[in-house]
Amino acid sequence: MSQLHVQKVPEVTSSTYLSSFRLFSSDSDDIEKTSSNVSPDVKNESIQTLKNQDLIRTLLKKLANLSLQDYYWRSDYFKKTEADRQVEESIARMMGEEASYLRPMDAGDGKIGPLGRAEKTLVKWLSLVIEEEGRRARLISSSNGELVRPMDLEVGGPLSNLESAAVTLIERIRSSEKERVLTSTLRPKDLEEEKRGPLGNLEAKVVNALDEIKRAERKRMELSRNRGGEVVRPIDVPGPLGEMELWYLELITAEKQRAKDRERNNGDLVRPKDGSIQGPMGTAEQKFSDAINYIREEETERLTNVKRFLQEKRPMEVDRNSALGWTEAFLVGVFRAPQLFFRVFDRVKELLESETLSLDETKKMETKEKK
């Protein structure tokens, strides 16, 4: 008979239950320890992130409030200055005179020059920027520190237009590059014109210019072969190289003629604009000279108006306690103090060198004074 193998089951005692309970309790303690070690860090990190966000919002709101106060101050100052200027012009017109001015942009329409027009354009641009930033600061302050980009304003300005243009440019480049990857197109210019971005348009312009040069050179080679190998210059064929050669020939011709003019002028220098043939250099110098003369006339007229303005309204006489009044009074005192000192010194020296009058001379002086 086969023997029956019976596996002996270990005896379960109270010590076995106790060891199992200890093992389970140790595992649960480890889990609790692990969870207690991870959760506080994550919690602290999230709390720190929220604190940083609140700090950034608070700082942004404070900066917006400062910007808003600066906007109010600048706006009031500009409005007051413009109002005073208009009042002065009105009074001058009623008196039949021209109002004196300090800034180039305040000159009349017939006397304003390049500096005045440039300043007027810049001031107008800055005023629009200040108004735009004032609106943006007001939105940031009222939105509890939320960042407001210039392009997010309902009524934009120069900065909004610049940011919108930059974002549009980047977005067009991104979309065109995505399309180029999806269509497996190697060169940006090979995309369809509707899907082509700035890079594709730039490459297309460069390629077109190179193709035009290539066509002109091929045509020049064909003309040279048709003429039996005679050299055909780029100027004889329409194209970019021909235009460059034409400009160079005009320059060389004008300079050669200027050298001849110098010989006729007994060796004295003849400027390019004064030559008998005015080339590219002469044209450029003439334009530059006209601009300089225009600016000189503008500044001469402005200097005359500045003198009139200072005579009419000297800061130390209008408001001596102001910054300009105090500065002028201080500088005038610094320059006049040595003169006063030397005058006093000369007077004392004159008195020391003088002689006493005799009795007869004293009587004569008294008689003259009585008469």
Image: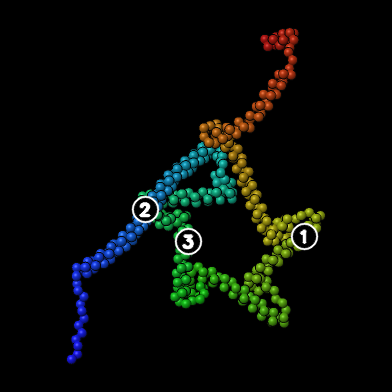
- The residue to which callout 1 is attached is 259
Residue 83 visible in image = no
Mark 1 vs mark 2, foreground winner is 2
The span from disc 2 to disc 3 (Cα, nearest Å) is 33 Å
Query: Residue 166 has which mark?
Result: 3
Mark 2 vs mark 3, foreground winner is 2
- Element type at mark 3: helix
Residue 191 x %, y %: 48, 74
Q: Residue at x 51, y 73 (%)?
A: 189
The span from disc 1 to disc 3 (Cα, nearest Å) is 51 Å
- The residue to which callout 2 is attached is 51
Residue 52 position (above or below residue 16): above
Residue found farthest to the right: 266
Q: Quadrant of residue 317?
A: top right
Residue 203 position (above or below residue 360): below
Q: Residue at x 40, y 54 (%)?
A: 147
